[in-house]
Amino acid sequence: MSDIKIPSDKEMKEKVIEGLKGIFDPELPVNIYDLGLIYEVECKTDEETKLKACTITMTLTSATCSMSEMIVDLVSSLNMRIDYLETVEVNLVFDPPWSQDKMSDAAKLEMGFL
C-alpha cells in the first residue's frame, strides 16, 4: 500500500496560488496574482476520486484585453502542472472592475507606483 499524501483543500489552494504567481501578464512585468486579477480561489475534494477541483474567480485589466484568451487558458490549464488537481474552472468577471488598488505592494513597486 502506498503512502501517497493528497494535499488538503487548504494546501491545494496554496499550490494553486503559487501556480498563479507563475503566470505573467504578457504586457506587464507582474504575475497575475500580484497584479490583483485573482479575486478568489476555492478548492474542494471530489469525494469519489479524492482529487481536487478548484474554481478561480478572476478578472482582466480590461474587458478588451488582447491577451485575455491566453491568460485564461494558462489559468485553466493549471491542473496539467499541479499534482492531484483534477479540474480548474475559471469564472471570468468584470464586476468589480480591476483597478491599480488591487495590486500587491510588490507589484506596485515593480511597476513604479510606489
Image (spheres, rainbow, N blue to C red):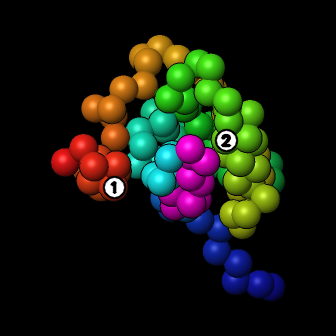
Residue 24 sits inside the magenta stretch = yes
The tally of labels here is 2
Identity of the residue drawn at 36% across and 26% down: 99
Identity of the residue drawn at 62% across and 37% down: 55
Check the image and report above or below for 36 versus 33. Answer: above
Please give the range of residues in magenta: 16-27
- Name the residue nearer the viewer: 33 or 81: 33
The label number, if any, that marks residue 110 in the structure image: 1
Check the image and report above or below for 58 versus 96. Answer: below
Q: Which residue is farthest left?
A: 114
In the rendered image, residue 3, in percent from the top left (x then y), is placed at 70, 83
User: Residue 90 vs residue 95: left or right?
Assistant: right
Check the image and report above or below for 29 versus 92. Answer: below
Q: Amino acid at mark 1?
A: Glu
Counting residues from the N terminus, which is met first, the one under dot 2 or under dot 1?
2
Residue 99 sits inside the magenta stretch = no
Query: Disc 2 marks which residue?
Result: 71
The label number, if any, that marks residue 70 in the structure image: none
In the rendered image, residue 113, in percent from the top left (x then y), is placed at 24, 44
Identity of the residue drawn at 50% across and 47% down: 28
User: Residue 48 vs residue 38: left or right?
Assistant: right
Q: Amino acid at mark 2?
A: Ile
Badge 1 marks a residue whose secondary structure is helix
